[in-house]
Image (cartoon, coloured by chain):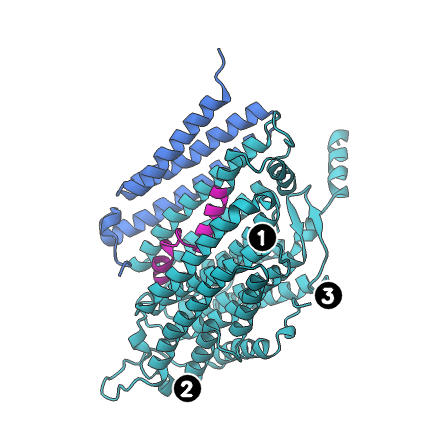
Amino acid sequence: MTVGLNAFILVAGLLFAIGLLGVILRKNTLIIYMSLELMLNAVNLALVAFSRYNGTMDGNLFVFFIITVAAAEVALGLAIIVALFRLRQTVMVDQLTALSR
Amino acid sequence: MNKLLIEFLSGYTATNQWAAILPEIMMGVLALCLLAAEMVLPKNRQAWVPRLAIWGQVLILMIAFGFVGRCSIGEFQYFSGLITQTDVTQIMRGFFLVSSIAVCYLGHIYLSKQTLPQTEFYALVLIISAGMMLLVQSTHFVMLFVALETVTVAFYVLVAYSRTSQFSLEAGLKYLILGALSSGILLFGIVLLYGIAGNPELLGASRDSLNYGELMNFVILNMNNMIVKIGALLVIAGVCFKIGAVPFQIWVPDVYQGAPTPVTAYLAVASKAAGFIVLIELVRGPFFGLQDFLVPVLSVIAAATILFGNIAAVAQRNVKRLMGLSGIAHAGYLLLGVIAVMRGVDWAVYAVIFYLVTYLLASFAVFGVMSIAAGEEDANQELDHYESFARKRPFLGGVLACGLGSLAGIPPLGGFIGKLFLFVAAFQAELYGLLIIAIVGVVISIYYYFGWIRECYFSSSSTAVVKDISCGATSSDRFLLGALTVASIVIGILPAALPIIR
């Protein structure tokens, strides 16, 4: 039995939705971060699936660019979170309100 | 030597197109040179780094425009469709170079008041500038994504640059989360379009479905496909995040306030400009067939953006947030131009660029004054600090008044002509409802811009000892700010002075 394209796209869509909800609902910056990664990986999954079923290589190639960019973003994000934690002793978004006046 | 390798190399050099992106490569090399110069130069010669950055960019500007001699270069595709150079991208090259030169100068003013590492700031500014030049040239979604992320990731660092200030770090974190979110949404849209346009069972399917041209043909044939529409909406939403349009504007006031003032200026001017050119290229290219669907969507966004930006700015006392919120309103006016382009008014592209140029001149004048007037903590710049500012610093007060007047759109200044062109374009595109909303927005904006000018000129604070905000302007500050103001006035009186009007 082979798994159809629709199944892949469904899973990718679900992962993307879980990630999006996580970013919107969760309060801990680190978990928001993981949710963002989940969204990017949903995109990767969909790309690979489309690439396989359409018979083109562009999608597979694009995935590598996305992985690289995601790595750069995470490195930067963790650096900012660590610097902020040293200054404020918290990573919860509802306590980071110095700017919202 | 391997014969295959030689064949490969000769084939490669036969299609050598790297000269097409020479200015971008030179920007990258200059950025690396700055980092090297910091190591080589002795401690007491470190002041050469900003000079090298600024004069290096002036040289690149001369080379970029010396090659072609004028702003129009025709249309060429390079790297098998990854980038396409047109007149618009050539003009934008100049635009980004001028704005990064100005940002380097403002950065020099800002960094002289802080104890922060210097060189990386200039290097990142140059890399962002090169990234934005490639971003507006890209006609392939992979290229678009990579250029966009180069710009965005470097911006994360710049926004959080002042790492001893909780405001800057918090702004950096907020920009990072929402920027990454918008990239994710953009990517999901791209993937849907890639998948559906490459599906061999559909009419007009393409093997190269990430390319704008191929996608445009596919979308015209399948304009009622649900997945095409969702993909296009997600891509547009991702771009709207970057330009700060409602409902994706939540990051703008916070990030503009927390970021160092030169970075705020860079975000407000160059990042927004790049977003708009990308948006125009998308709606003229791949999404050309979706006009009937996208025009109402963008019209609602434009109306909401204009009203939200202006109404929220009225009650604002922090000048950096004020500039951010009014920047949202300016994005709304520019969306008017984009919608006009979609409705077939082709010259509206030049109206948008003209508006961006006047916005650049006026914004950098205002942000320049703010950089000079800022104290040690750069996020807290309240309107009250500008009490009788013009009496203490007549020159800076005058520059500020001209810049704000141009942003508000007062007749002898450039901003007025920019708004006029945009509104005429919108009129020709028969967008009467939006036009009324835009004019209401302009009237509101005059109120808060003039509130700031009034604070400078007519505040009656004889008793209050206004704390002396900083040292005055040096002669080179005066030169830069004076040049920006004069350019604003000249463009306002003589719009044809700008070579893009033909």
The colour chain A appears in is blue
| Subunit of label 3 | B
Tag 1 and tag 2 share a subunit = yes
Residue nearest the viewer, comparing A23 with B31:
A23
Q: Which mark is residue B69?
A: 3
Residue type of the residue flagged with mark 1: Met
Q: Say if B150 sits above or below B191 in the image.
A: below
Tell me the quarter of the picture where residue B212 sits.
top right
Q: Quadrant of the C terminus of chain A?
A: bottom left
| Badge 2: residue crowd in 10 Å (few <14, some 14–19, many ≥20) | some
| Badge 1: residue crowd in 10 Å (few <14, some 14–19, many ≥20) | many
Disc nearer the start of the sequence (2/3): 3
* Contact? badges 1 and 3 (CB < 8 Å): no
Residue carrying label 1: B342
Seen at 51% across and 26% down, the residue is: A49
Magenta span: predominant SS is helix
| Subunit of label 2 | B
Disc nearer the start of the sequence (1/3): 3
Residue carrying label 2: B394
Percent of width and height locating residue B12: 73, 40
Seen at 47% across and 49% down, the residue is: B297
